[in-house]
Image (cartoon, helix red, strand yellow):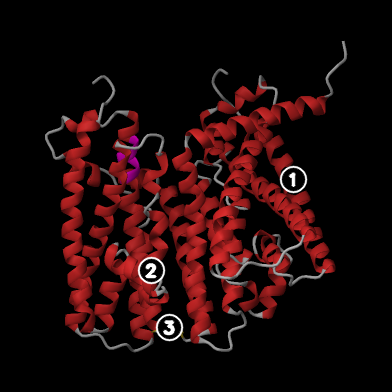
Amino acid sequence: MSAVSPWRKRLVIWARLSNIALQGQLVYRFNFFLNTFKYGWYIWLMVFVWLAVSRSNPDFSMTQTQVVQYYVLAAILFGFSNHYLDEVDFEIKQGSISRFLVKPVGTFHFYYVPALVRTLSETLVKVVVLTAAMWWFESLPQLNLAQIAVTAFLLLLVHFFSYNLHYVISLFSFWFQQVYSIRYSMGFIVRFLSGLLVPLSLLPLPAQTAIRWSPFPEYASTPIALLQNQLSWWQIEQRAIVLLFWTAVVLLVRNRVWREATHAYESTGI
Amino acid sequence: MTLFEYRRSFYFWTIVSTMWTLFNFLVIGVMGSVTGQIGNWPFPYVMILISTFTIIDSMTWGWFYINMWQYTSHIYSGTLSGFLVKPIDTQFLMMTQDNSFNNIPRFFLGVAGLVGTIWWYQISITPLQLLLYCLVLPVGMMFLYFVWFILATLAFWVERFNNIHDLLPGLRQIYQMPRTIYPKWLFFVVSVLFPVALVTAAPVELLISLNSWPWALYLFAMTFFMAAVARRFFLYSIKRFSGVGN
């Protein structure tokens, strides 16, 4: 009897988790569409704000087409960095983490794989609807396969990094009651630093330079610039290296916090 | 009592809400540095609008959201039955049963922003304008709340729509900015058909000029209309309710 390789087992488990996540989306389809468009609408509204700004200032650095493209693309990309891990906080506080002692899947992967599937399915719907909107506004960007492939890779890395960051915050539930307040307070700051609220090119140069050392421009500003042909390959590589660095840091922190948390963990029964 | 029991939560949310409000003002400040006006509204008037939005937002999250979330939860879990037999109007109970003090700091930040902007830019306000602003502001909040209640009552009709109470908070950004930024068709939708933009626009436009009193009157009328619709819709929908053990 041949042994099944661990990676094959893992892939089978991930496929099952993905299937469960997709089924959840279909059963709760009203929730799915509401969540998909709620944050898309929030970013889309910025289109009107910045179009108004560009109309009142003839020297504004972005054309109307660029403004529409910028925020519609931001609305599509927003889902890759917008996570709600309240269920993780809740399960830690309830003591439900114990069940992972008997599950054939690690805690992180159990939460991450469905989250990735949800993000991809929401993004697919947004791409269809918002591409039609950009076509209506005659603001469709000219894309090639290489751009799309590099953007997709960058966005998957962004999703992995941002989810790990939120996960680390959730792990503090082992010690604190209301970690969601930390997440919420971070949310607005991160949206600002990523260029979702204000294009980073409008900030003073020293601020732009400082922000570029953080991973947050990769949430929106960098992939949008990539899709608008505003970055050279060397700049893309630089951004990817910065993001990989911060991903490595957050993984180290996550593993350390998890180790400390399991020492502090107590629950009643299994 | 709950507030004093969970003081740390209150302090935490004070910090969170302060940061959110300050970043809101920062974003507007960056826009103001690019242009002195947004949608033909001079920058000081936009700051007044944002301060008003902050005051309304403190009520949205401190009172409206928590009640609407519990309302839809009771419908979906079937526990609304316990409220139907209480000797108090169920709709009134659903709309007022709970609140949170965590957003009180935001209210004061909004008031501080409003007073600070008027003082800093030496904007002249008459007592009549201030009185009308204080009268129209709660009317706008009530309009918002009744619309929210109508949307939450859809939970009687649509299953597996647990996030229905999140629908209206997602539209808050409509009244966060001057309504003049919208194209004509959208201006008509958000000012006439579904006048959610008037929630902030009506009191602020009265504060800076008395010429927009027709819009304030329209908001009054729509609020009464929404209150009547909310009442009728709730009484009609309650017949569909089948609670636990009914």
Specify the principal SS of the magenta part.
Answer: helix
Disc 3 residue type (three-letter): Phe
Residue at the spot of label 2: B186
- Residue sitting at x 48%, y 86%: A56
Mark 3: secondary structure: helix
Mark 1 lies on residue: A251
Segment colored magenta = B68-73
Left or right, B203 with reference to A222: left
Amino acid under disc 1 = Leu
Of residues A19 and B16, the one nearer the viewer is A19
Instruction: Tell me, yes or no, whether dots 1 and 2 are on the same chain.
Output: no
Q: What is the x, y in percent for residue B148?
A: 30, 51
As measured in the structure, the alpha-carbon distance from the residue carrying label 1 to the one carrying label 3 is 44 Å
In front: label 1 or label 3: 3
Q: CA distance from mark 2 to mark 3?
A: 22 Å
The kind of residue tagged 2 is Leu
Of residue B48 and residue B188, the one placed in the foreground of this image is: B188
Answer yes or no: do the residues labelled 1 and 2 have beta carbons within 8 Å?
no
